[in-house]
Amino acid sequence: MTLIPPKDRKQVEALEPLLGMVEQAMGFVPNSMLTMAHWPELLQSFAGLGGTVLSGGTLDPGLKQLIALVISSAAGCRYCQAHTSHGAEHRGVEAARIEAAFEYETSDLFSEAERAALRVAAHAGMVPNAVEPKHIETLRAHYSERECVEVVAVIALFGFLNRWNDTLATTLEDAPAAFAASHLTGHGWAPGKHA
């Protein structure tokens, strides 16, 4: 149960255009966003940043979701693992690739470029951050500097979301919870405090 209850949409009618767009894109409104709605300006700023990072740029949106899944796994946020795996599937990533994201180093389902991005995500999610210059050098061998910035932007966005959702024990919504239960439990996923 979320430690700070999400706002009911009726309580934040001024945010309805934003919440409606999120619902159209995701199929539901995340409880994390409804909790942010206690501070409407925060939610609006976050939505702008999140939209730019996840939907803008040149990197494949499915790869961005896999990057978010790997950093969320390294950070231990079960809520974000469920959301990002479901988001990857929603963006056309095959279930086998989502399930193999935890074995990106050895799975033949990933290219060297994808491995470089996922490696940076995994090391960035560790505390303390374990990214070393060699990780960025390998990333730069496959991506433009702009694309490297996109990779780090996804990582930074989910650094915020991992802390937000894990701190508040945000309750998982049905769709991402069901997807994670079907595809991530073999890798140790359980809803934990997000049930």
Image (cartoon, helix red, strand yellow):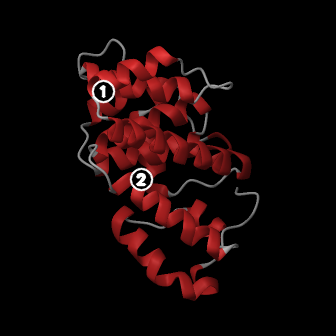
The crowd level at tag 2 (other Cα within 10 Å; few <14, some 14-19, many 20+) is many
Would residue 102 be seen by someone viewing this image from the given angle? no
What residue is pinned by disc 1?
114
- In the picture, measured across the screen, residue 47 lies left or right of residue 55, that is right
Residue depicted at 33% across the width and 11% down the height: 106
Quick check: can you spot residue 55? yes
Amino acid bearing label 1? Glu
Residue 170 is labelled as none
Give the crowd class for mark 1: few <14, some 14-19, many >=20 residues within 10 Å.
some
Q: Determine the residue positioned at 69% across, 50% down.
A: 169
Residue 59, given in percent of the width and then of the height, sits at 28, 43
Residue at the location (36% across, 18% down)?
138
Residue at which label 2 appears: 53
How many badges with numbers are in the image? Answer: 2
Residue 86 percent location from the top left of the image: 38, 47
The kind of residue tagged 2 is Val
Instruction: Identify the residue shown where x is 56% and y is 87%.
Output: 14
Q: Residue furthest front?
A: 145
Label 2: which secondary element: helix
